[in-house]
Amino acid sequence: MGKGFSGRARRCYSCAGQYEPFSGCSRDPRQVRQASVMPGVLYTGLERRLYAALERILARFMMMHSAKALKKMRSLAKPAIALGRSGARRRGWSKLGGFPDLPASLVWPVGRGSPLGFVAQLDLGALPVSEDLRFMPDTGMLYVFFDQEQSVSGLSPDDRDAWRVLYTEDAPVPSRRRPPPGLDAGLITREVFLEGRKILSFPSPERAGINDAGMDDAEAEDFYDQAIELLYQPFDGEPQHQLGGLPNPVLSDSMEMEVQLALNGIDYAGFVEEEEVAPFMGGVGDWLLLLQIASDDEAQLHWGDEGCLYFWIRKQDLVARNFDLVWMRLQSY
């Protein structure tokens, strides 16, 4: 995530960003100039003390601005389920990779002319209940599959057949279904078992409507560092696998709009007119984050360059158990 924020370039902050940096940062008072007022003018001791006092006031103001922004992010938090490592080795438990425990009633999905790669399965009955996904079934299994070539991002309506999310009400049965012919054996990933725990998921600065317009370079950098720490803290250093809640975006945080348009036949990656998308914007708020699967070295899951898969579902489709209408977005650096 650190790469996902566009922080500003580092520079000398000895003057709180109010004056031009000077060679070597000597802090020689005779060299301090206020570039924006009268370049080249040397200031008296009294003037320097006045400017120093103003700088301290400005620094306190900036700290208040940053703290207010972080407080806003915390106030918009939503409950979610973090999917972390489990020591269990029992078949049928939630996991990444390996072979799925598909019951006989489900067919291994095919897309793009070949079997889709198995990503994850979730034993819903073994996971905590999330308030944000109160419409989620509390029993049964979810199975997640994705194009083994990772040839789509989910922005285009034509991407639809590159993933599938299957649901069965049946309790997990240890079956370890081996993939059908056509799936590259080298793309079968390592099995990593998961367990869920309740967390708070926080909005990105973009989602919270926060920008750094009122911050100087130093404060903007400090704010983004703290924002990133806030977004990652709930995962305790593990990959950001998550059920429900708010996304931890790699790139832009407007995925609800993107998937709404794609589902309705509009390619947001191309040029679109405002009047073309206007009829569909009312449905953007129906979308919920179903599942987030991050890149994971241990599970040998790598989505582009340290990217992430986001699976979205509309609330009405979740209530109806219509997982065929889940839409996926892949974001990568």
Image: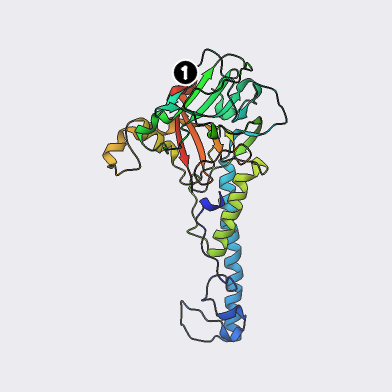
For this view, does 69 lie left or right of residue 92?
left
- What kind of residue is marked 1? Ala
Q: Quadrant of residue 222?
A: bottom right
For this view, does 20 lie left or right of residue 171?
left
Which residue matches tag 1? 320
Q: Give neighbour class at mark 1: few <14, some 14-19, many 20+ (Cα, 10 Å).
A: few
Colour scheme of this structure image?
rainbow
Residue 228 at what x, y percent from top left? 59, 50
Image height of 231 relative to 23, above or below: above
Residue 67 at what x, y percent from top left? 60, 54
**Local secondary structure at mark 1:** loop
Count numbered badges in the picture: 1
Residue positioned 59% across, 81% down in the render: 48
Q: Residue furthest right?
A: 87
Q: Quadrant of residue 151?
A: top left
Residue 86 at what x, y percent from top left? 70, 31
Image height of 218 relative to 109, above or below: below
Image height of 45 relative to 86, above or below: below
Image height of 231 relative to 135, above or below: below
For this view, does 97 lie left or right of residue 264?
right
Residue 87 at what x, y percent from top left? 73, 31
* Residue placed most toward the observer, 86 or 319: 86
* Residue placed most toward the observer, 54 or 218: 218
